[in-house]
Amino acid sequence: MKILVTGASGSVGRVVVEGLLAAGVQVRALTRDPDRVDLPAGAQAVAGDLTQPAGLDAALEGVDRMYLFPVPTAVCEVVAAAERAGVRRIVTLSSGAVTAGYDTVHHLPVERAVEAAGVEWTHVRPGEFAMNKVALWGPDVRAERVVRHPAPEAIWCPVHERDIADVAVTALLEDGHHGAAHTVNGPPISLRDQARALAEALGQEVRFEQVTPEDARRRYRAQGGFAAAAADFLLGFVDHAGNPTDPHALADFDLTAFGPQPTVRDVTGAAPRTFGQWARDHVADFR
């Protein structure tokens, strides 16, 4: 069996590569610049871009199954190329926002393209990535040991990237997941308690400073990168489609009010990793 992992240098894709290699599977890892990416030993790195499907034939040659990173730009062409190459199972990295009905413009088109193909398919729909905190909170924690956010008591279910990858690897290797959309969350925790978990991992105090949504947006935009690009959406100024929303509505948000949230346990039987464990695993990112 040979599996192509797209987005192989990403926070989830890299762990998917590790999991497949540990299972003894041949792994081909797609990335835009293999010479600049340090992939796990044993993976065959190949160059490719999901926005340029015409150049994927070599990467797809001999591949049985594929982990698909969500790039809606040319997804129909990418899936068609995979079918022509003989790929028979595709596991898609999607989003819990599709489960909730919020995301119809980014992940949903990718899901639909895969479902329309003549392959076995499974969607993995993570909720909030715990990993986002590195980009959003990392600069302030490293420089000042402070977290700044407008909603300290908001309760979310940030999910460890290893939980997401475990579900993807299971769906890639095991039968019985065709036609399933696995939503994956972590244990619920408030933003204030997330800051406390970072403090415990660091062994130093991390203050939580409540700021206005407008101030938080200004700070994220000044940071650049992911924080700047996602500031309006993550702070509640716009929805998934870019329509204006009220950022103050997030102050009392509690994801658990919608009932128990599905986790990795529903797919693999393993206990979901806590945010505290994620903080310990990523303590170097906040030093």
Image (spheres, helix red, strand yellow):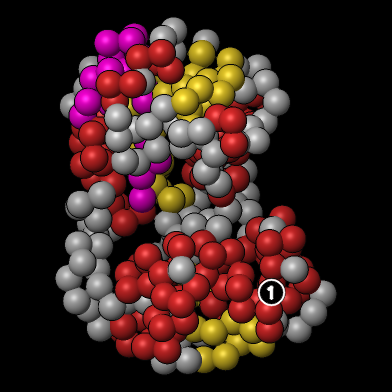
Q: Is residue 263 left or right of residue 254?
A: right
Q: Residues within 10 Å of mark 1 (few under 14, many from 20)?
A: some
> Where does residue 237 sit, x and y in percent of width and height?
28, 78
> Where does residue 110 sit, x and y in percent of width and height?
26, 38
Q: Is residue 216 left or right of residue 141?
A: left
Highlighted range, magenta: 76-95
> Where does residue 29 sit, x and y in percent of width and height?
52, 26
Q: Nearer the viewer, residue 88 or 175?
A: 88
Q: Is residue 85 visible?
A: yes
The part of the image, by quadrant, that contains residue 40 is: top right
Q: Residue at x 37, y 25 (%)?
A: 90
Q: Residue at x 36, y 53 (%)?
A: 96
Tell me: residue 35, above or below residue 110: above
Q: Is residue 170 visible?
A: no
User: Where is the C terminus found, in terms of image quarters?
Assistant: bottom right
Q: Residue at x 65, y 17 (%)?
A: 24
Tell me: residue 117, above or below residue 130: above
Q: Nearer the viewer, residue 212 or 155?
A: 212
Within the magenta stretch, is there residue 84?
Answer: yes
Q: Is residue 68 left or right of residue 162?
A: left
- The residue to which callout 1 is attached is 142
